[in-house]
Amino acid sequence: MLKQQLQLKLSQKLSPQQIQLMKLMQLSTLDFEQRLQYEIEQNPALEKGKEIKDQDDNTLNNEFEEDFSDSEDVNIDNYLTDDEVPNYKLNSKNYTNEEDEKTIPISGEIGFHQLLKNQISSLILNKKETLIAEFIIGSIDDSGYIRRSKQDLIDDLAFTQNIFIEEKELSNILKKVQSLDPPGIGSNSLKECLSIQLSRKPASIPQIMASKIINEGFDLFSKKHFDKLKEKFDVNEDLLKDGLREIEKLNPKPGGALSGIIQNNHIVPDFILKIENDSLLVSINNRNAPELHISNSYMDMMKGYKESKTKNKSQKQAIQFIKQKLDSAQWFIDAIKQRHQTLLKTINAIVDFQKDFLLSGDENLIKPMILKDIAEKIDMDISTISRVANSKYLETPYGTKLLKSFFSESLKNNLGEEVSTLEIKNILKELIDNEDKKHPLPDIVLSNNLKEKGYKVARRTIAKYREQLGFSVARLRKKL
């Protein structure tokens, strides 16, 4: 049965400009440069470089809201006015000089898996075995391990490569892949990885002892039960230490030896901080950012259309295309301008909040600061502050730091003063670094030590901070 209904709905939608601004806001310097280049390539109405002005220059007025989807004439006067050109340039007194280096460092190394495939030629394999070896290499993760069972590999070879083999044949080829460099590549487990690395070392007493520990006492070794290892192998403490030192030289993630080379991530600071006469001066790093303006040739086309006495259908279609590109170019320039204003406003608020730390470099002077503090200070939304802080770097006299690292929760000490959790983590790290490795401190003891220093921190919080600092539990930190 058909019904007629009247429904009233209120909804909020983001405009294209707002969406574009949010995307630009969270880009780092390198990503922003790439985004600029992409936009210039895609939009012929957007040009870089200094604009050459004529005496009769006419410009774009951004106050237009008409929809030209129909075949109506475009109001050219909305685009052509006698006002001065609103020339927004990326370089100004807030940004770096034009003499700054304008090159982006590029990593030219080949990939981790390609390095392994290049070594296949040193193996004695036929065409079928070469394909299988390449498939096995493609299944190795960034740590250097194969996390899948042999049966899964056999099934995938059959379905994706139309290659049918037995498990024995796969095992033989896998052993040959495991003979590639670095040692331990293509292992199924940590035990196998360490065992392969030890087997390729020259024979010595420490090497034999280490091989016994891994191959025959891996469970006891992983649980740090050193007394039981001495009893199992009937060796003294010195010989066991020699074996453990040999194991410490091994690489538990052999893939990292290669992937670390190729992942050449260059950090380009988004902001630059300088100290002059005990004053903090912060600027936006605009290296490689061009000056942008609306294309004069497109403006000439608009003028030509206005002055033309005959306007056919093809001309109307062309002028609507021009109108679309002009709109897009102006929106992009406005979004960049707003982005830079927001970035400057946010970084100045952060620098002012952490002034004591930035003037001295003493991390104990970092104040507790959350996103809400900065958002309220500059009257912006928390999500905007998060986008700015999440992937931006600040170059300081004490090193390049991620903006996110300036934000931390607060805890109260025994004097009732609010202190940053970063300060507590630094003290916790110092306690663990200086502990007796034969008898490492459990979390409850660390909590009591902090309490003696004036910081009341629960054991569960200690465990959380310890994990964030990359320390294992006390049992796994134990050493002979």
Image (spheres, grey):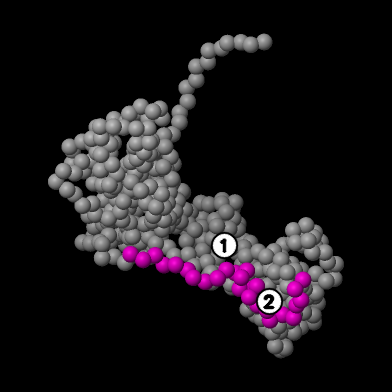
The answer to whether residue 107 is magenta is yes
**Dot in front, 2 or 1:** 2
Label 1's element? loop
Residue at x 37% of width, y 60% of height: 269
Q: Residue 120 carries which label?
A: 2
Residue at x 72% of width, y 80% of height: 123
The quadrant where residue 435 appears: bottom right
The one nearer the camera, 230 or 373, is: 373
Q: Are marks 2 and 1 in contact (CB under 8 Å)?
A: no
> How many neighbours does mark 2 have within 10 angstroms: few (below 14), some (14-19), or many (20 or more)?
some
Label 2's element? helix
The one nearer the camera, 120 or 198, is: 120
The quadrant where residue 66 appears: top left
Residue at x 68% of width, y 72% of height: 185
Q: In the displayed structure, would residue 329 be above or below residue 434?
A: above
Residue 470 x %, y %: 57, 62
Give the labeled residue for mark 1: 470
Q: In this view, does 69 lie to the left or right of 224?
A: left
The answer to whether residue 418 is magenta is no
The boundaries of the magenta stretch are 102-128
Residue 292 x %, y %: 29, 50
The one nearer the camera, 220 or 415, is: 220
Residue 334 x %, y %: 32, 42
The amino acid type of the residue labelled 2 equals Ile
